Image (cartoon, rainbow, N blue to C red):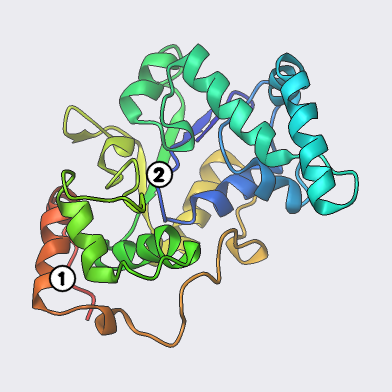
Amino acid sequence: MLISFKKKYIFMHSRKTAGSSITVLLNKDLGPRDIQIGAWPDALDAGGKYNDHAISIIKRNLNQIIKESIKHSLFKKKIAINHNSINKSIKKYAAQEYGLTNGAHSSAMQVMFFAKEYWDSFFKFAFIRNPWDHAISDFYWKVKNRNIKNVDFKEFLFRLADPHRLDKEKTRPSIITNWSIYTINEKVALDFIGRYENLEKDLEKIENIIGVKLDINSIWSKSNIRKKNKSIADYYDEESIELVRQIYKKEIEEFNYQIPF
């Protein structure tokens, strides 16, 4: 999530929609007071830097960050700042001081309440993704990426569909869908909702509005996790198709998403 006072926009970071990559691009034109929550290690890896707002939070948590960086340096066997620790510190500060309890994926309601002075006048945008594709991406991020062997794709969907289902491996994300990130009182509350399926063209539209270069091909954060040799259809049978329809019911109805195979 990013609030830019410099460029007068609010980027709502929905999960598994290239949000980290978009944040990396936005970081390249970050103003000193702008609030970026999440994706700091990715931004720094891409040549970005901490702004004044982030540095002020780092100073507040300097002792803890130094401790974490010493541990990190010992593990790496070289002197290194633990940017993940800094990322967590910024998220914690935002939760405690701003009421943004879901960090980078804070809800539109929370952000509106925190930034009520700017909410109506700033350009607000986010991205959505076909639910049947989104579910696969989330499965790889939460299960395959962590090398969990005993949870297959359908079991993952069962866990998303039923919040009371046993999940000892903690594969269920804290936010099941992105609905709360771009809606308030069940209605879309942002000025522009781009589609992951139309990412480059929709980023061009946003670029023209906010005046920040958004060449997604220059940076893909958290990519190459999912297998490229399997099609979306390979993951599904009739039962899993219906599970996705149940889990993402609101998104499917609001944005008229269809099964993409």
Q: Find residue 227 and report its horizontal and vertical position in percent.
A: 46, 79
Quarter-of-image position of residue 31: top right
Q: Residue at x 17, y 50 (%)?
A: 165
Secondary structure of the residue carrying tag 2 is: strand
The relative height of residue 151 versus residue 9 in the rendered view (above or below) is below
Query: Which residue ends up furthest to the bottom in the rendered image?
Result: 229
Q: Find residue 18 and report its horizontal and vertical position in percent.
A: 49, 56
The residues tagged by marks 2 and 1 sit, at their Cα atoms, a distance apart of 27 Å
The relative height of residue 201 versus residue 160 in the rendered view (above or below) is below
Image disc number at residue 240: 1
Q: Find residue 250 and report its horizontal and vertical position in percent.
A: 14, 48
Secondary structure of the residue carrying tag 1 is: helix
The relative height of residue 120 versus residue 257 in the rendered view (above or below) is above
Quarter-of-image position of residue 163: top left
**Residue 210 in view (yes/no):** yes
Residues packed near mark 2 inside 10 Å, few (<14), some (14 to 19) or many (20 plus) = many
Q: Residue at x 61, y 27 (%)?
A: 90
| Amino acid beneath label 2 | Ala
Image disc number at residue 112: none
| Amino acid beneath label 1 | Ser
Q: Residue at x 71, y 14 (%)?
A: 60
| Mark 2, residue position | 126
N-term-proximal mark, 2 vs 1: 2
| Foreground of the two, 72 or 218 | 72
Q: Is residue 254 left or right of residue 177?
A: left
Q: Find residue 84 and report its horizontal and vertical position in percent.
A: 66, 40
| Foreground of the two, 81 or 24 | 81
